[in-house]
Image (cartoon, coloured by chain):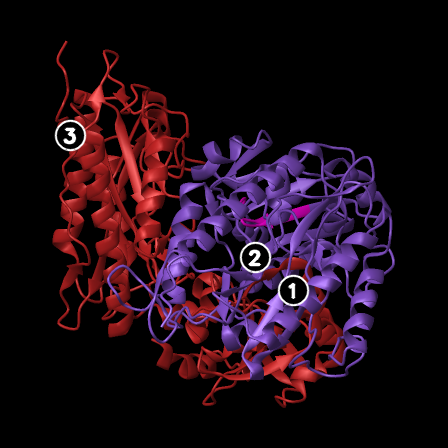
Chain colours: A red, B purple
């Protein structure tokens, strides 16, 4: 939680931190500002002290909404740090020691301002933590009640839209070639479905920051294929629908996946679904408070390996099929954050109180034109129970309402 | 144009460039990939050679849509560069010389991978160009026909939505206190108007990446205030409506501003509008092929200074009112890019063939509760003419259609 940051700074022996970049779509900055239209700002924080926000004077009104102390600049903060770092560093009395830099920024700016700071303050050591285990991701790993409420609300919006999508698809007419048809009789495509999803998100104050995955057939067999816009919606094909919207303005995410087959399923696809579903249930049944997340990844790898699939634990090199990713991840201001579940992740990635994480086993066979993934987001409650934040049925075959039998 | 990149690399004595980060919402990467759901990739390019794209194997299908040669990795590219830079550098035969880094990335990753590369290859000099004049912004400064067509299309969408907004506002009922009312009789707020704009954007395949500015009264007097959600829409107040949507997926932007006063204007606001409008017209009438952009900024500063306003050229320190920004900027994959128009910008920022730029003078008086800005985006055509890419009337007072006189 945010209140852990001071302790984490001390543990990491950081005398100060600078968070750079925009106030929104930039998790470490958002963590302090709560978003807002502030571009190219610099937030300065020392252990035990309140953060201060430097920003272009033109954006001071937006910056003030954060509730932070705001210091206006005549230009963007990175320009000041490149040309005149002492303007900020002297005022904040940072002239030596370990200073951590965080946030997302143009790489040219990062290299230029790092050079300028090193030239001006030889006694400052700039620290760039690999983001996956930074003090921010450690603080963000556990959520307070208001964060849980916001993620839960995004989950409600997500499952509502998933339900609308299922209902929309199953009410379509179907042509003789098993392709779904639009009202005008032309084939329904992935692009058509996605444009509906985008609209439904916008209506609910949510945004599709990173690209909803709606992948059918071969694309479903490639985990991060977002789907081919012109692909036709067709019966009896696996559809991987992975939706991870965020609050508009770059806030909290939800993350959710279902795999569907419209009308009917081929026996091979049904077998693949049953296998993933079985492993999913086995994981959920075994989730324990304070367990190491990677233990479940190992469990899943062993299960799938036993059935003859490739897994990241048993197969060297780049994985083209089988189980090709890790079991899940933390969820918050980042769609992927701590705790991590790779079988090689450090032990400290635990399912502790306040953690929100996904469970998402999957099996992928692009050459067979199919893939299956099931994903929900869980919260480790104060009583130690694992609570799914948005319930939704797991049905694989969605019966068509108007399917005209030939 | 993109074809200028090889020459610009040679001019900057770069032996190779690496572009890092996501394929979308990351202009230097998008310039090569055309977007797509590819996160944490590394694009490598040498002068005169085709670019190569490294990405996580899970995203290889998305990456392949770019048409580039794709090399799959087992993890994200920055993780490879931090832990094993030779994996990419040896294969690309980059072991010494000047290597430019571009794109947007987590600062911790940038500092970590820069350190790893320097440790492994002491003969490599990493170059981080300040982004505002990088080889990318120089190449992007002039647009080819397809880029002009895409920006023009965004302009058409933009002005269509501006028209819908004007029509929506002027058809509202007005209460006795001059506040616009919704159908249910409650006051219409900035948040209500914005949610309509977001929907209209989503319906047209456009996104509000950085936050539409719809600011009334005092907020209108602060150039980058995006507006207060709960503010009521009221007659006789200046409304600054600055809308800069992008193609969904992080493509090309448009940029456009009008200032309105609903029902009537106060004499003071009308005077402010007339002043800005006069200066706007004077600039447009004087635009010349190959002129220095900053000459127009100086012209505007001098005009406004003569009338007693603060300007960046005549006033020291942070500007709280008057003319507080520069006249315009280039427009493309970045909402702000070369050419620049600060009075201190280098001479090389010229209105040359193929440039697309904004002209947006404004005057701001937050303490008086008002501000005015007028903005259009222009293209320097092959025949040297300056063409506005989307026409829209400049009316300041929008007459209400249903205003019930008391």
Q: Measuring 65% from the left and 72% from the top, which residue is drawn there?
A: B272
Q: Chain of mark 1?
A: A
**Which type of secondary structure does the marked residue at label 1 adopt?**
helix
Q: Are discs 1 and 2 less than 8 Å apart at CB?
A: yes
Look at 54% across and 49% down and name the residue there: B25
Q: Which residue is mark 1?
A: A110
Chain for disc number 2: B
Q: Residue at x 77, y 38 (%)?
A: B381
Say which of A207 and B406 sits in front: B406
Q: What is the x, y in percent for residue A72? A: 61, 81
Q: Nearer the viewer, residue B264 or B164?
A: B264
Name the quadrant containing residue A220: top left
Distance from disc 3 to disc 2, alpha carbons, whole Å, reads 41 Å
Residue B77 image point, x, y percent: 54, 47
Marks 3 and 2 in Cβ contact (< 8 Å): no
Identify the residue position indicated by label 2 in the image: B105
What quarter of the picture does the N terminus of chain B occupy? top right
Inspect the magenta stretch and tell me whether residue A374 lies in it.
Answer: no
Q: Residues within 10 Å of mark 2 (few under 14, many from 20)?
A: many
User: x, y percentage for residue B195?
Assistant: 37, 57
Considering depth in this image, is B165 or A180 the residue closer to the camera? B165
> What residue sits 38% from the left and 37% below the top?
A315
**What segment carries the magenta color?**
B18-26
- B142 vs A158, left or right, is right
């Amino acid at each position: 939680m945010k209140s852990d940051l001071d302790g984490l700074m001390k543990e990491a022996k950081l005398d100060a931190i600078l968070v750079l970049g925009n106030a929104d779509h930039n998790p470490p900055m958002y963590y302090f500002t709560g978003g807002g239209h502030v571009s190219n700002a610099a937030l300065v924080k020392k252990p035990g002290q309140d953060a201060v926000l430097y920003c272009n004077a033109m954006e001071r009104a937006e910056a003030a909404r954060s509730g932070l102390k705001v210091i206006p600049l005549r230009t963007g903060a990175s320009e000041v740090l490149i040309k005149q770092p002492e303007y900020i560093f002297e005022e904040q009395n940072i002239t030596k020691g370990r200073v951590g830099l965080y946030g997302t920024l143009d790489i040219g700016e990062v290299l230029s301002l790092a050079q300028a700071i090193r030239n001006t303050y030889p006694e400052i050591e700039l620290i760039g933590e690999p983001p996956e285990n930074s003090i921010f991701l450690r603080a963000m790993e556990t959520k307070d009640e208001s964060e849980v409420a916001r993620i839960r609300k995004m989950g409600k919006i997500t499952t509502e839209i998933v339900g609308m999508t299922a209902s929309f698809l199953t009410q379509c007419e179907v042509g003789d070639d098993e392709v779904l048809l639009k009202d005008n009789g032309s084939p329904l495509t992935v692009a058509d479905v996605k444009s509906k999803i985008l609209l439904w998100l916008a209506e609910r104050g949510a945004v599709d920051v990173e690209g909803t995955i709606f992948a059918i057939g071969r694309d479903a067999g490639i985990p991060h294929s977002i789907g081919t816009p012109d692909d036709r919606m067709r019966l009896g094909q696996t559809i991987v629908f992975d939706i991870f919207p965020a609050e508009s303005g770059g806030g909290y995410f939800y993350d959710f996946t279902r795999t569907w087959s419209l009308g009917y399923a081929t026996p091979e696809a049904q077998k693949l679904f049953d296998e993933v579903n079985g492993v999913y249930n086995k994981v959920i049944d075994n989730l324990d408070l304070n367990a190491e997340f990677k233990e479940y990844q190992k469990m899943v790898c062993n299960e799938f390996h036993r059935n003859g699939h490739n897994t990241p634990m048993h197969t060297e090199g780049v994985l083209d099929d089988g189980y090709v990713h890790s079991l899940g991840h933390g969820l918050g201001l980042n769609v992927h954050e701590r705790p991590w579940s790779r079988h090689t992740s450090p032990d400290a990635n635990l399912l502790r109180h306040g953690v929100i994480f996904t469970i998402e086993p999957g099996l992928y066979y692009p050459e067979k034109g199919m893939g299956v993934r099931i994903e929900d987001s869980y919260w480790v409650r104060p009583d130690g129970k694992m609570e799914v934040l948005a319930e939704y049925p797991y049905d694989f075959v969605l019966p068509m309402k108007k399917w005209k039998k030939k």
